[in-house]
Image (cartoon, grey):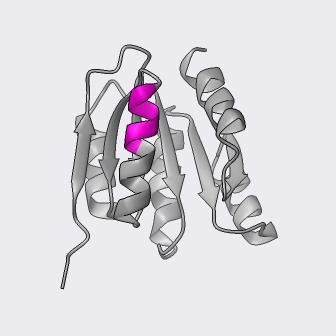
Amino acid sequence: MRTQTAETNTLDGRRGLILALDKNLSNLELLRKFLGREGYGVIGVSSIEQFKEKILKEPAINLAVVDVSGFDRRVWNCCEKLKMLDIPFIVLSPQQSATIKQQGINYGAEKIMVKPLILKDFLSAICNFVNN
């Protein structure tokens, strides 16, 4: 059985540092590669525990991307912590959901995006938040 505690790092980003949380390791790797090609540094984590650790230990995070798929309600506590630290974040949702949208708004998400992502829109949102 494969444990999902993989952490991927690409910290040489010239455009900013993004913390990405995704339980799906394949999606996390795709996100890391995509953002890396666009010039961003990426810290990819697949567990809430890793996410909490990186929030506290990495002072240079410009943006977080939080895929809520597969996580329980504790994921919103992570979002609340991001808000408290003034780290903007984008919530990725597996489907159009009024509940997830409301939770995202309540916890301070800058944007809620539904998968599958339109990469042009996703990249535009990232640019807006990282470059501000």
What residue lies at 45% left-to-right and 45% top-to-bottom?
31
Q: Residue furthest right?
A: 98
What residue lies at 48% left-to-right and 60% top-to-bottom?
77
**Location of residue 19 with respect to 95 vertically, above or below:** above
Q: In screen coordinates, is 47 left or right of 15? A: left
Q: Residue furthest bottom?
A: 1
Residue 71 visible here: yes
Choose between 59 and 16: the one closer to the eye: 16
Task: Report the predominant secondary structure element of the magenta stretch.
Answer: helix
What residue lies at 42% left-to-right and 27% top-to-bottom?
37
**Quadrant that contains the C terminus:** top right
Choose between 120 and 79: the one closer to the eye: 120
Which percent across, then down, holds residue 127?
60, 22
What residue lies at 56% left-to-right and 34% top-to-bottom?
88
Which percent across, then down, holds residue 53?
25, 49
Q: In screen coordinates, is 3 left or right of 103? A: left
Residues shaded magenta: 32-37
Residue 19 visible here: no
**Quadrant that contains the N terminus:** bottom left
Q: What is the count of numbered marks?
A: 0
**Location of residue 107 with respect to 23 vertically, above or below:** above
Q: In screen coordinates, is 42 left or right of 88? A: left
**Location of residue 10 with respect to 65 vertically, above or below:** above
Q: Is residue 29 magenta?
A: no
Q: In screen coordinates, is 93 left or right of 10? A: right
Which percent across, then down, holds residue 23?
40, 66
Which percent across, then down, holds residue 92?
61, 55
